[in-house]
Image (spheres, rainbow, N blue to C red):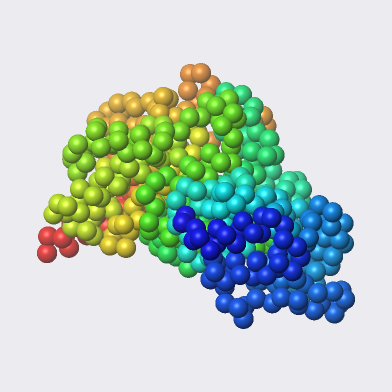
Amino acid sequence: MTVSQSTADLLRHLASRPGHDEVKADFRQLLVEEFGVELDALKFEHWVPEVRGRLDGLIGRTIFEAKRDLDREWPDVEHRMPAYLADREREENQHFVGIASDGHRWAVFELNAGKLVVVKRAVLDPERPDEFLAWLDGALALKSSLPPDPLTVRAELGHDSVAFHLVNGRLRGLWERLKLHRDVSLKRRLWADLLKLVYGREVECDGLWFQHTFVVIVAKCIALAVMRLREDDPKRLLSGDAFASAGIHGAVESDFFDWVVVDPEGEDLVRRVMAHVRRFRLAEVESDVLKVIYESLIDREQRNRLGEYYTPDWLAAKMVRRTVDRPLEQRVLDPACGSGTFLFHAVRRFLAEAESGDMDPAMSAAEVCAHVAGTDIHPVAVIIARVTYLLALAPALSRRSGALSIPVYLGDAMQLSISQILAGKELTIRVPPPPAGEGRSGEIDVNGREQLDFPETFCRDPALFDKAVERMRTGSQADMTRAQIEAALHRIVEQHYRADVTREQQHAI
Protein backbone atom coordinates (compact mmCIF):
# COMPACT_ATOMS: atom_id res chain seq x y z
CA MET A 1 0.00 0.00 0.00
CA THR A 2 1.44 3.39 -1.06
CA VAL A 3 0.80 6.25 1.36
CA SER A 4 0.96 9.83 0.06
CA GLN A 5 3.19 12.37 1.74
CA SER A 6 0.19 14.44 2.85
CA THR A 7 -1.40 11.38 4.50
CA ALA A 8 1.90 10.46 6.15
CA ASP A 9 2.19 14.01 7.55
CA LEU A 10 -1.42 13.88 8.73
CA LEU A 11 -0.84 10.62 10.60
CA ARG A 12 2.32 11.96 12.17
CA HIS A 13 0.39 14.97 13.45
CA LEU A 14 -2.40 12.73 14.80
CA ALA A 15 0.10 10.52 16.60
CA SER A 16 1.35 13.57 18.53
CA ARG A 17 -2.03 13.80 20.35
CA PRO A 18 -2.72 17.38 19.18
CA GLY A 19 -5.91 17.91 21.22
CA HIS A 20 -9.65 17.36 20.90
CA ASP A 21 -10.48 19.79 18.08
CA GLU A 22 -7.39 18.97 16.01
CA VAL A 23 -7.93 15.22 16.35
CA LYS A 24 -11.46 15.71 15.05
CA ALA A 25 -10.27 17.92 12.16
CA ASP A 26 -7.42 15.56 11.23
CA PHE A 27 -9.75 12.57 11.29
CA ARG A 28 -12.20 14.33 8.98
CA GLN A 29 -9.39 15.23 6.58
CA LEU A 30 -8.10 11.64 6.67
CA LEU A 31 -11.54 10.30 5.75
CA VAL A 32 -11.80 12.66 2.78
CA GLU A 33 -8.24 12.36 1.43
CA GLU A 34 -7.41 8.72 2.11
CA PHE A 35 -10.80 6.99 2.16
CA GLY A 36 -12.56 9.14 -0.44
CA VAL A 37 -15.53 9.98 1.78
CA GLU A 38 -17.71 12.83 0.53
CA LEU A 39 -18.02 15.73 2.96
CA ASP A 40 -21.80 15.57 2.92
CA ALA A 41 -21.59 11.95 4.13
CA LEU A 42 -19.86 13.12 7.33
CA LYS A 43 -21.81 14.43 10.27
CA PHE A 44 -19.73 16.20 12.90
CA GLU A 45 -21.09 17.74 16.10
CA HIS A 46 -24.28 15.72 15.60
CA TRP A 47 -26.78 16.59 18.35
CA VAL A 48 -28.53 13.61 20.00
CA PRO A 49 -31.43 15.02 22.05
CA GLU A 50 -32.34 11.68 23.61
CA VAL A 51 -29.00 11.54 25.42
CA ARG A 52 -28.45 15.32 25.61
CA GLY A 53 -25.05 15.19 23.96
CA ARG A 54 -23.20 15.73 20.69
CA LEU A 55 -21.47 13.07 18.66
CA ASP A 56 -18.06 14.31 17.57
CA GLY A 57 -18.51 12.37 14.33
CA LEU A 58 -20.98 10.05 12.59
CA ILE A 59 -19.68 8.16 9.54
CA GLY A 60 -21.99 5.52 8.15
CA ARG A 61 -22.52 3.07 10.99
CA THR A 62 -19.57 4.35 13.02
CA ILE A 63 -19.62 6.87 15.89
CA PHE A 64 -16.39 8.79 16.47
CA GLU A 65 -15.37 10.47 19.70
CA ALA A 66 -12.24 12.64 19.83
CA LYS A 67 -10.26 13.02 23.07
CA ARG A 68 -7.27 14.96 24.31
CA ASP A 69 -5.95 12.01 26.32
CA LEU A 70 -7.79 8.73 25.87
CA ASP A 71 -6.41 7.09 29.00
CA ARG A 72 -7.42 9.96 31.29
CA GLU A 73 -10.80 10.42 29.63
CA TRP A 74 -11.65 6.73 29.51
CA PRO A 75 -14.42 7.01 32.16
CA ASP A 76 -16.15 9.64 29.99
CA VAL A 77 -16.02 7.27 26.99
CA GLU A 78 -17.49 4.43 29.06
CA HIS A 79 -20.27 6.76 30.21
CA ARG A 80 -21.25 8.32 26.86
CA MET A 81 -20.49 5.68 24.23
CA PRO A 82 -23.15 3.13 25.30
CA ALA A 83 -25.88 5.77 25.12
CA TYR A 84 -24.70 7.00 21.71
CA LEU A 85 -24.55 3.46 20.27
CA ALA A 86 -27.92 2.48 21.74
CA ASP A 87 -29.54 5.63 20.32
CA ARG A 88 -28.21 5.06 16.78
CA GLU A 89 -29.09 1.38 16.78
CA ARG A 90 -32.60 2.15 17.96
CA GLU A 91 -33.06 4.85 15.32
CA GLU A 92 -31.49 2.99 12.39
CA ASN A 93 -32.24 -0.61 13.41
CA GLN A 94 -28.68 -1.55 12.44
CA HIS A 95 -25.53 -2.54 14.32
CA PHE A 96 -23.15 0.37 15.03
CA VAL A 97 -19.56 0.49 16.25
CA GLY A 98 -17.86 3.29 18.14
CA ILE A 99 -14.31 4.62 17.86
CA ALA A 100 -12.63 6.80 20.48
CA SER A 101 -9.16 8.28 19.95
CA ASP A 102 -6.72 10.96 21.03
CA GLY A 103 -4.87 10.50 17.72
CA HIS A 104 -2.20 8.22 19.19
CA ARG A 105 -4.35 5.60 20.91
CA TRP A 106 -7.49 4.19 19.32
CA ALA A 107 -10.25 1.91 20.60
CA VAL A 108 -13.20 0.27 18.85
CA PHE A 109 -16.40 -0.52 20.78
CA GLU A 110 -19.72 -2.24 20.28
CA LEU A 111 -22.79 -2.99 22.35
CA ASN A 112 -23.19 -6.67 23.16
CA ALA A 113 -26.30 -7.64 25.13
CA GLY A 114 -26.64 -3.98 26.12
CA LYS A 115 -23.12 -3.74 27.55
CA LEU A 116 -20.21 -1.76 26.12
CA VAL A 117 -17.45 -4.07 24.88
CA VAL A 118 -13.98 -3.07 23.71
CA VAL A 119 -13.53 -4.87 20.40
CA LYS A 120 -9.96 -3.83 19.60
CA ARG A 121 -7.33 -1.32 20.62
CA ALA A 122 -4.58 0.09 18.41
CA VAL A 123 -1.68 2.51 18.61
CA LEU A 124 -0.87 4.72 15.62
CA ASP A 125 2.77 4.25 14.65
CA PRO A 126 3.52 7.00 12.08
CA GLU A 127 6.47 4.94 10.83
CA ARG A 128 4.08 2.16 9.76
CA PRO A 129 1.20 4.11 8.19
CA ASP A 130 0.02 1.33 5.86
CA GLU A 131 -0.69 -1.01 8.79
CA PHE A 132 -2.69 1.62 10.64
CA LEU A 133 -4.74 2.59 7.58
CA ALA A 134 -5.57 -1.06 6.88
CA TRP A 135 -6.62 -1.50 10.51
CA LEU A 136 -8.78 1.65 10.42
CA ASP A 137 -10.48 0.54 7.21
CA GLY A 138 -11.29 -2.75 8.92
CA ALA A 139 -13.13 -0.76 11.58
CA LEU A 140 -14.87 1.65 9.21
CA ALA A 141 -15.33 -0.63 6.16
CA LEU A 142 -15.40 2.42 3.90
CA LYS A 143 -13.23 1.40 0.94
CA SER A 144 -15.27 -0.42 -1.67
CA SER A 145 -12.29 -1.87 -3.53
CA LEU A 146 -9.45 -3.66 -1.74
CA PRO A 147 -6.39 -5.39 -3.20
CA PRO A 148 -6.17 -9.10 -2.23
CA ASP A 149 -2.54 -8.88 -1.13
CA PRO A 150 -1.36 -10.60 2.08
CA LEU A 151 -1.02 -7.36 4.10
CA THR A 152 -4.53 -6.15 3.31
CA VAL A 153 -6.11 -9.59 3.76
CA ARG A 154 -4.42 -10.04 7.14
CA ALA A 155 -5.32 -6.53 8.29
CA GLU A 156 -8.96 -6.85 7.21
CA LEU A 157 -9.66 -10.47 8.20
CA GLY A 158 -6.77 -11.79 10.28
CA HIS A 159 -6.47 -12.34 14.03
CA ASP A 160 -5.78 -8.68 14.81
CA SER A 161 -8.50 -7.33 12.54
CA VAL A 162 -11.53 -5.52 13.86
CA ALA A 163 -13.71 -7.81 11.72
CA PHE A 164 -12.45 -10.95 13.46
CA HIS A 165 -12.83 -9.49 16.94
CA LEU A 166 -16.37 -8.33 16.19
CA VAL A 167 -17.41 -11.70 14.75
CA ASN A 168 -15.59 -13.70 17.42
CA GLY A 169 -17.44 -11.87 20.19
CA ARG A 170 -20.77 -12.51 18.49
CA LEU A 171 -19.95 -16.19 17.92
CA ARG A 172 -19.29 -16.63 21.63
CA GLY A 173 -22.68 -15.14 22.46
CA LEU A 174 -24.40 -17.33 19.86
CA TRP A 175 -22.67 -20.44 21.18
CA GLU A 176 -23.88 -19.78 24.72
CA ARG A 177 -27.45 -19.70 23.40
CA LEU A 178 -27.17 -22.61 20.98
CA LYS A 179 -24.73 -25.09 22.52
CA LEU A 180 -27.54 -27.26 23.93
CA HIS A 181 -29.38 -27.31 20.59
CA ARG A 182 -29.41 -30.94 19.39
CA ASP A 183 -28.12 -30.32 15.85
CA VAL A 184 -25.57 -27.72 16.93
CA SER A 185 -24.08 -29.89 19.67
CA LEU A 186 -23.88 -32.81 17.21
CA LYS A 187 -21.92 -30.69 14.70
CA ARG A 188 -19.50 -29.67 17.45
CA ARG A 189 -19.00 -33.31 18.49
CA LEU A 190 -18.43 -34.51 14.92
CA TRP A 191 -15.91 -31.71 14.38
CA ALA A 192 -14.07 -32.67 17.57
CA ASP A 193 -14.07 -36.37 16.60
CA LEU A 194 -12.54 -35.59 13.20
CA LEU A 195 -9.85 -33.40 14.75
CA LYS A 196 -8.96 -36.21 17.14
CA LEU A 197 -8.64 -38.52 14.15
CA VAL A 198 -6.38 -35.97 12.41
CA TYR A 199 -4.07 -35.25 15.35
CA GLY A 200 -4.34 -38.48 17.30
CA ARG A 201 -5.37 -36.66 20.48
CA GLU A 202 -7.94 -34.26 21.86
CA VAL A 203 -7.25 -30.70 20.66
CA GLU A 204 -10.66 -29.05 20.45
CA CYS A 205 -11.59 -26.03 22.53
CA ASP A 206 -14.02 -23.12 22.26
CA GLY A 207 -11.38 -20.78 20.84
CA LEU A 208 -10.44 -23.17 18.03
CA TRP A 209 -14.13 -23.87 17.31
CA PHE A 210 -14.79 -20.13 16.85
CA GLN A 211 -11.62 -19.61 14.78
CA HIS A 212 -12.54 -22.48 12.45
CA THR A 213 -16.11 -21.20 12.18
CA PHE A 214 -14.87 -17.73 11.24
CA VAL A 215 -12.36 -18.88 8.62
CA VAL A 216 -14.92 -21.22 7.01
CA ILE A 217 -17.55 -18.47 6.81
CA VAL A 218 -14.95 -16.15 5.25
CA ALA A 219 -13.88 -18.87 2.80
CA LYS A 220 -17.44 -19.48 1.66
CA CYS A 221 -18.07 -15.74 1.31
CA ILE A 222 -14.92 -15.53 -0.84
CA ALA A 223 -16.27 -18.35 -3.02
CA LEU A 224 -19.54 -16.43 -3.40
CA ALA A 225 -17.68 -13.26 -4.35
CA VAL A 226 -15.34 -14.90 -6.86
CA MET A 227 -18.37 -16.47 -8.56
CA ARG A 228 -20.00 -12.99 -8.58
CA LEU A 229 -23.17 -14.48 -7.17
CA ARG A 230 -25.48 -11.92 -5.57
CA GLU A 231 -26.96 -14.46 -3.19
CA ASP A 232 -27.94 -12.84 0.11
CA ASP A 233 -29.36 -15.86 1.97
CA PRO A 234 -26.76 -17.07 4.52
CA LYS A 235 -28.35 -20.53 4.67
CA ARG A 236 -28.07 -21.02 0.91
CA LEU A 237 -24.49 -19.77 1.05
CA LEU A 238 -23.29 -22.05 3.85
CA SER A 239 -25.17 -25.12 2.58
CA GLY A 240 -23.76 -24.73 -0.94
CA ASP A 241 -27.21 -24.49 -2.54
CA ALA A 242 -26.31 -21.14 -4.12
CA PHE A 243 -23.34 -22.76 -5.89
CA ALA A 244 -25.22 -25.89 -6.95
CA SER A 245 -27.81 -23.63 -8.60
CA ALA A 246 -24.98 -21.96 -10.51
CA GLY A 247 -23.60 -25.33 -11.69
CA ILE A 248 -20.64 -25.49 -9.28
CA HIS A 249 -20.51 -28.69 -7.24
CA GLY A 250 -18.08 -29.75 -4.53
CA ALA A 251 -16.82 -26.23 -3.82
CA VAL A 252 -19.12 -25.36 -0.91
CA GLU A 253 -21.19 -27.89 1.01
CA SER A 254 -23.11 -28.12 4.25
CA ASP A 255 -20.78 -28.87 7.16
CA PHE A 256 -20.22 -28.38 10.91
CA PHE A 257 -19.93 -24.63 10.67
CA ASP A 258 -23.40 -23.75 9.41
CA TRP A 259 -24.49 -24.00 13.07
CA VAL A 260 -24.48 -20.21 13.18
CA VAL A 261 -27.53 -19.83 10.92
CA VAL A 262 -29.77 -21.72 13.35
CA ASP A 263 -30.28 -18.27 14.93
CA PRO A 264 -31.37 -15.08 13.07
CA GLU A 265 -28.50 -13.16 14.70
CA GLY A 266 -26.11 -15.66 13.13
CA GLU A 267 -27.66 -15.01 9.73
CA ASP A 268 -27.08 -11.27 10.19
CA LEU A 269 -23.49 -11.99 11.19
CA VAL A 270 -22.86 -13.96 7.98
CA ARG A 271 -24.38 -11.14 5.90
CA ARG A 272 -21.91 -8.70 7.46
CA VAL A 273 -19.00 -10.97 6.54
CA MET A 274 -20.41 -11.26 2.99
CA ALA A 275 -20.40 -7.48 2.63
CA HIS A 276 -16.89 -7.20 4.06
CA VAL A 277 -15.43 -9.85 1.74
CA ARG A 278 -17.11 -8.48 -1.39
CA ARG A 279 -14.92 -5.39 -1.14
CA PHE A 280 -11.85 -7.37 -2.28
CA ARG A 281 -10.86 -7.44 -5.95
CA LEU A 282 -10.68 -11.23 -5.95
CA ALA A 283 -10.13 -11.47 -9.71
CA GLU A 284 -6.59 -10.19 -8.99
CA VAL A 285 -5.68 -13.02 -6.57
CA GLU A 286 -2.23 -14.44 -7.29
CA SER A 287 -1.67 -16.55 -4.17
CA ASP A 288 -3.34 -18.70 -1.51
CA VAL A 289 -4.98 -15.86 0.44
CA LEU A 290 -6.96 -18.18 2.71
CA LYS A 291 -3.72 -19.59 4.03
CA VAL A 292 -2.82 -16.05 5.13
CA ILE A 293 -6.03 -15.82 7.17
CA TYR A 294 -5.64 -19.29 8.69
CA GLU A 295 -2.00 -18.72 9.65
CA SER A 296 -2.99 -15.42 11.24
CA LEU A 297 -5.81 -16.95 13.29
CA ILE A 298 -3.89 -20.04 14.45
CA ASP A 299 -0.60 -18.82 15.92
CA ARG A 300 2.66 -20.40 14.75
CA GLU A 301 3.40 -22.19 18.05
CA GLN A 302 -0.05 -23.80 18.08
CA ARG A 303 0.22 -24.83 14.41
CA ASN A 304 3.67 -26.35 14.95
CA ARG A 305 2.45 -28.18 18.04
CA LEU A 306 -0.33 -29.67 15.91
CA GLY A 307 2.15 -30.57 13.18
CA GLU A 308 0.81 -28.04 10.65
CA TYR A 309 3.41 -26.54 8.31
CA TYR A 310 2.40 -24.52 5.26
CA THR A 311 4.48 -24.17 2.11
CA PRO A 312 5.21 -20.55 1.08
CA ASP A 313 3.55 -19.53 -2.18
CA TRP A 314 6.84 -18.70 -3.89
CA LEU A 315 8.19 -22.20 -3.16
CA ALA A 316 4.99 -23.95 -4.25
CA ALA A 317 4.95 -21.96 -7.51
CA LYS A 318 8.61 -22.81 -8.18
CA MET A 319 8.08 -26.53 -7.52
CA VAL A 320 5.05 -26.63 -9.79
CA ARG A 321 6.98 -24.90 -12.59
CA ARG A 322 9.80 -27.43 -12.29
CA THR A 323 7.78 -30.62 -11.90
CA VAL A 324 4.70 -30.00 -14.05
CA ASP A 325 6.40 -29.45 -17.40
CA ARG A 326 3.49 -30.70 -19.53
CA PRO A 327 0.44 -29.37 -17.65
CA LEU A 328 -2.08 -30.17 -20.40
CA GLU A 329 -1.00 -33.83 -20.44
CA GLN A 330 0.02 -34.62 -16.87
CA ARG A 331 -2.30 -35.32 -13.96
CA VAL A 332 -1.50 -33.68 -10.64
CA LEU A 333 -2.60 -35.06 -7.26
CA ASP A 334 -1.73 -33.48 -3.93
CA PRO A 335 -2.60 -36.20 -1.36
CA ALA A 336 -2.13 -33.84 1.60
CA CYS A 337 -3.19 -30.57 0.02
CA GLY A 338 -3.71 -28.48 3.18
CA SER A 339 -5.14 -25.10 2.25
CA GLY A 340 -4.52 -25.79 -1.45
CA THR A 341 -1.34 -23.82 -2.18
CA PHE A 342 0.07 -26.39 -4.62
CA LEU A 343 -3.36 -26.87 -6.18
CA PHE A 344 -3.65 -23.11 -6.75
CA HIS A 345 -0.39 -22.92 -8.68
CA ALA A 346 -1.00 -26.17 -10.58
CA VAL A 347 -4.39 -24.86 -11.74
CA ARG A 348 -2.94 -21.49 -12.74
CA ARG A 349 -0.12 -23.24 -14.65
CA PHE A 350 -2.65 -25.34 -16.55
CA LEU A 351 -4.76 -22.30 -17.43
CA ALA A 352 -1.73 -20.33 -18.62
CA GLU A 353 -0.69 -23.21 -20.89
CA ALA A 354 -4.26 -23.68 -22.14
CA GLU A 355 -4.53 -19.98 -23.01
CA SER A 356 -1.28 -19.99 -24.96
CA GLY A 357 -2.33 -23.17 -26.80
CA ASP A 358 -5.38 -23.95 -28.90
CA MET A 359 -7.72 -25.23 -26.17
CA ASP A 360 -11.30 -24.02 -26.39
CA PRO A 361 -11.64 -21.39 -23.58
CA ALA A 362 -15.07 -22.78 -22.75
CA MET A 363 -13.50 -26.15 -21.92
CA SER A 364 -10.43 -25.03 -19.94
CA ALA A 365 -12.14 -24.98 -16.52
CA ALA A 366 -13.56 -28.48 -16.94
CA GLU A 367 -10.23 -29.78 -18.25
CA VAL A 368 -8.40 -28.40 -15.21
CA CYS A 369 -10.77 -30.29 -12.93
CA ALA A 370 -9.95 -33.48 -14.81
CA HIS A 371 -6.19 -32.93 -14.42
CA VAL A 372 -5.61 -31.41 -10.95
CA ALA A 373 -7.00 -32.88 -7.72
CA GLY A 374 -6.32 -32.95 -4.00
CA THR A 375 -7.24 -34.69 -0.75
CA ASP A 376 -6.60 -34.00 2.91
CA ILE A 377 -7.62 -35.54 6.21
CA HIS A 378 -8.22 -32.18 7.93
CA PRO A 379 -11.88 -31.11 7.54
CA VAL A 380 -11.18 -27.36 7.68
CA ALA A 381 -8.21 -27.64 5.31
CA VAL A 382 -10.42 -29.34 2.73
CA ILE A 383 -13.09 -26.62 2.96
CA ILE A 384 -10.41 -23.96 2.49
CA ALA A 385 -8.66 -25.86 -0.33
CA ARG A 386 -11.90 -26.16 -2.30
CA VAL A 387 -12.33 -22.39 -2.22
CA THR A 388 -8.64 -21.87 -3.05
CA TYR A 389 -9.17 -24.13 -6.08
CA LEU A 390 -12.15 -21.99 -7.10
CA LEU A 391 -10.05 -18.84 -6.71
CA ALA A 392 -7.39 -20.36 -8.97
CA LEU A 393 -10.11 -21.08 -11.54
CA ALA A 394 -11.34 -17.47 -11.47
CA PRO A 395 -9.85 -16.47 -14.88
CA ALA A 396 -11.73 -19.33 -16.57
CA LEU A 397 -15.03 -19.30 -14.69
CA SER A 398 -16.78 -16.67 -16.80
CA ARG A 399 -15.97 -18.62 -19.99
CA ARG A 400 -16.87 -22.10 -18.74
CA SER A 401 -19.39 -24.26 -20.52
CA GLY A 402 -21.55 -26.48 -18.34
CA ALA A 403 -21.35 -27.55 -14.71
CA LEU A 404 -18.11 -28.07 -12.76
CA SER A 405 -17.19 -30.35 -9.88
CA ILE A 406 -14.24 -29.22 -7.73
CA PRO A 407 -12.02 -32.31 -7.20
CA VAL A 408 -10.84 -31.75 -3.61
CA TYR A 409 -11.86 -34.44 -1.14
CA LEU A 410 -11.81 -35.19 2.57
CA GLY A 411 -9.98 -38.46 3.10
CA ASP A 412 -6.89 -40.17 4.44
CA ALA A 413 -4.60 -40.87 1.49
CA MET A 414 -2.69 -43.39 3.61
CA GLN A 415 -5.79 -45.49 4.28
CA LEU A 416 -7.39 -45.80 0.83
CA SER A 417 -7.91 -49.43 -0.19
CA ILE A 418 -8.71 -50.55 -3.74
CA SER A 419 -9.84 -54.11 -4.26
CA GLN A 420 -10.60 -56.14 -7.38
CA ILE A 421 -14.24 -57.30 -7.60
CA LEU A 422 -14.80 -59.70 -10.50
CA ALA A 423 -14.18 -57.59 -13.62
CA GLY A 424 -14.22 -54.28 -11.80
CA LYS A 425 -12.70 -52.44 -8.85
CA GLU A 426 -14.04 -50.66 -5.81
CA LEU A 427 -12.67 -48.17 -3.31
CA THR A 428 -13.04 -49.02 0.36
CA ILE A 429 -12.95 -46.27 2.97
CA ARG A 430 -12.71 -47.33 6.59
CA VAL A 431 -14.20 -44.95 9.12
CA PRO A 432 -14.12 -44.77 12.93
CA PRO A 433 -16.95 -46.50 14.79
CA PRO A 434 -19.95 -44.35 15.81
CA PRO A 435 -20.36 -43.24 19.43
CA ALA A 436 -21.76 -45.78 21.87
CA GLY A 437 -25.48 -46.25 21.52
CA GLU A 438 -25.65 -45.24 17.84
CA GLY A 439 -26.21 -47.74 15.06
CA ARG A 440 -23.98 -48.59 12.12
CA SER A 441 -24.96 -48.14 8.51
CA GLY A 442 -22.15 -49.74 6.51
CA GLU A 443 -20.32 -53.06 6.25
CA ILE A 444 -17.94 -54.17 9.02
CA ASP A 445 -14.35 -55.25 8.28
CA VAL A 446 -12.34 -57.93 10.12
CA ASN A 447 -11.09 -55.40 12.66
CA GLY A 448 -14.61 -54.31 13.60
CA ARG A 449 -14.38 -50.99 11.77
CA GLU A 450 -17.17 -49.67 9.61
CA GLN A 451 -16.41 -49.37 5.92
CA LEU A 452 -17.94 -47.70 2.89
CA ASP A 453 -17.48 -49.32 -0.52
CA PHE A 454 -17.62 -47.15 -3.66
CA PRO A 455 -17.73 -48.94 -7.07
CA GLU A 456 -15.18 -47.83 -9.64
CA THR A 457 -18.04 -46.25 -11.62
CA PHE A 458 -18.26 -43.47 -9.02
CA CYS A 459 -14.52 -43.13 -8.47
CA ARG A 460 -13.70 -42.57 -12.13
CA ASP A 461 -15.89 -39.48 -12.38
CA PRO A 462 -15.56 -36.73 -9.71
CA ALA A 463 -18.85 -35.11 -10.75
CA LEU A 464 -20.68 -38.42 -10.36
CA PHE A 465 -18.99 -39.04 -7.01
CA ASP A 466 -20.12 -35.62 -5.74
CA LYS A 467 -23.69 -36.31 -6.84
CA ALA A 468 -23.64 -39.65 -5.03
CA VAL A 469 -22.33 -38.20 -1.78
CA GLU A 470 -24.85 -35.35 -1.90
CA ARG A 471 -27.69 -37.82 -2.52
CA MET A 472 -26.54 -39.91 0.44
CA ARG A 473 -26.55 -36.79 2.62
CA THR A 474 -30.01 -35.61 1.59
CA GLY A 475 -31.35 -39.16 1.84
CA SER A 476 -30.06 -39.46 5.36
CA GLN A 477 -31.63 -36.14 6.31
CA ALA A 478 -34.95 -37.39 4.89
CA ASP A 479 -34.69 -40.64 6.92
CA MET A 480 -34.59 -42.78 3.78
CA THR A 481 -33.76 -46.47 4.20
CA ARG A 482 -30.54 -47.93 2.90
CA ALA A 483 -32.46 -49.66 0.07
CA GLN A 484 -34.08 -46.36 -0.95
CA ILE A 485 -30.73 -44.58 -1.02
CA GLU A 486 -29.15 -47.37 -3.08
CA ALA A 487 -32.03 -47.16 -5.57
CA ALA A 488 -31.54 -43.38 -5.79
CA LEU A 489 -27.81 -43.90 -6.48
CA HIS A 490 -28.61 -46.31 -9.34
CA ARG A 491 -30.89 -43.66 -10.85
CA ILE A 492 -28.12 -41.05 -10.57
CA VAL A 493 -25.74 -43.31 -12.53
CA GLU A 494 -28.35 -43.91 -15.26
CA GLN A 495 -29.19 -40.20 -15.58
CA HIS A 496 -25.51 -39.21 -15.55
CA TYR A 497 -24.55 -41.52 -18.39
CA ARG A 498 -27.67 -40.73 -20.42
CA ALA A 499 -26.62 -37.08 -20.21
CA ASP A 500 -23.09 -38.02 -21.35
CA VAL A 501 -24.46 -39.90 -24.38
CA THR A 502 -26.66 -36.92 -25.27
CA ARG A 503 -23.70 -34.53 -25.07
CA GLU A 504 -21.59 -36.81 -27.28
CA GLN A 505 -24.38 -37.02 -29.87
CA GLN A 506 -24.78 -33.23 -29.89
CA HIS A 507 -21.01 -32.82 -30.26
CA ALA A 508 -20.99 -35.26 -33.19
CA ILE A 509 -23.75 -33.29 -34.92
Which residue is nearer to you in this view: 375 or 441? Answer: 375
Q: Is residue 118 above or below residue 303?
A: below
Which residue is nearer to you in this view: 439 or 383? Answer: 383
Does residue 62 appear anywhere in the picture?
Answer: yes
Please provide percent x and percent y for residue 432: 55, 28
Direction from residue 255 to residue 267 in the image, left or right: right
Q: What residue is shown at x 18% (from left), y 58% (from top)? A: 360
Q: Is residue 343 above or below residue 23?
A: above
Q: Which quadrant of the figure has residue 88?
A: bottom right
Which residue is nearer to you in this view: 453 or 27? Answer: 27
Q: What residue is shown at x 60% (from left), y 66% (from top)? A: 30
Q: For the C terminus, which image quadrant? A: bottom left
Does residue 455 appear anywhere in the picture?
Answer: no
Q: Residue furthest left?
A: 509
Q: Which quadrant of the figure has residue 202?
A: top right
Direction from residue 390 to residue 425 in the image, left or right: left
Please provide percent x and percent y for residue 210: 65, 44
Which residue is nearer to you in this view: 229 or 479? Answer: 229
Q: What residue is shown at x 65% (from left), y 33% (from top)? A: 204
All told, the count of numbered labels is 0
Q: Is residue 340 above or below residue 61?
A: above
Q: What residue is shown at x 45% (from left), y 65% (from top)? A: 229
Q: Residue furthest top?
A: 447
Please provide percent x and percent y for residue 245: 43, 63
Please provide percent x and percent y for residue 23: 70, 64
Direction from residue 161 to residue 331 in the image, left or right: left
